[in-house]
Image (spheres, rainbow, N blue to C red):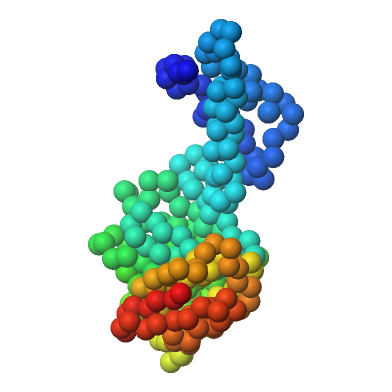
Amino acid sequence: MKVKKENIENINFEKLWDELPVAGKLDSGQKERMWEQIDLKMVRPAKKNNHWWVAAAATVLMVAGSAIALNMTSHSNYLEVISYESSKTILLQDSTEIILGQHSKLKYPAEFGWFNRDVSLEGNAIFKVKHNGKSFTVTSGGFKTKVLGTFFKVDMSPDYSTAKVSLFEGKVQVSYKDSKTAILKPGDQWSYNTKKELPNLNHQENLTAKNVKLDFKNASLTEVLKQLSLIYGVKISSKEGVNEKMKITGTFYYSTPLQSLEEMGYPFGLSVKKINKLQYEIK
């Protein structure tokens, strides 16, 4: 039994998609309009089992629901990624890697990298920016952090009153409302209080060792391994025994790749093997 391709393509999916709420729940009116559009556009063969068109319609709804489940939403020409109780990794089109902290939101252009590399942040995130000759700018409230290629963390308070930028590698330029500019070098930590209008710059040797912490709540072990790979700059391969059902909850601090991997694998009886300085295996 075949579906006429041209009829499926004419369904007004874009309009229906725009009606989807971020929470992923449709009211009765939205459900009725969606099914009406699907019902009108599908061509059903006469006197034959028509379960195929129900399956096709269900696929449409499943695709819409899957985007919401990933906490990634589209607003015009921008994409938003939201984290809740666990941090998550994001890979942008220019190969920049990001760990989005708990209860944070990242917004960036759908065609990221074509014209600019500007992102906006609510909350906190760790960035490992890929150098490609174009500047990369993180805007958080009135604060801006501009780089070419580096490794740093931006932490913004929920009320946008204080900001903190910690630099692990490379060089960044920070500013508030395009003034009060400062240039940071590895180990520098810059903070600013908008109420007091006072910037503060200090140097901490332990920052050069990527002194960061990661928070997880019921996060899959595979996601945790991605974040450790980014933090330490090593390749982590997983063998038999590692799967999505393994969940991690807790706060973990930077130490060494081997120690961190052993801490993550211990609850599941997994062992860690150091292949070389930049490559590890967990199984």
Residue 110 visible at all: yes
Name the residue furthest left: 133
Q: Looking at the picture, how far across and down is residue 260, in whole percent?
A: 49, 82
Task: Classify 282 as above or below 101.
Answer: below
Residue depicted at x 63% and y 19%: 36
> Is residue 197 depicted above or below 32 in this figure?
below
Q: Position of residue 90 (x, y in %)?
A: 46, 60
Say whether residue 232 is left or right of residue 76. Answer: left
Q: Residue at x 40, y 86 (%)?
A: 208
Which residue ends up furthest to the top in the rendered image? 46
In this picture, residue 261 sits left or right of residue 105:
left
| Residue drawn at (64%, 23%) of the image | 35
- Residue 114's spot in the image, x, y percent? 31, 48
In this rendering, position of residue 113 left or right of residue 16: left
Query: Could you say where residue 126 lies in the image, as x and y percent from the top left?
Result: 47, 70
Front-most of residues 224 and 130: 224
The quarter holding residue 101 reads bottom right
Residue occupying the point 59% across, 60% down: 83
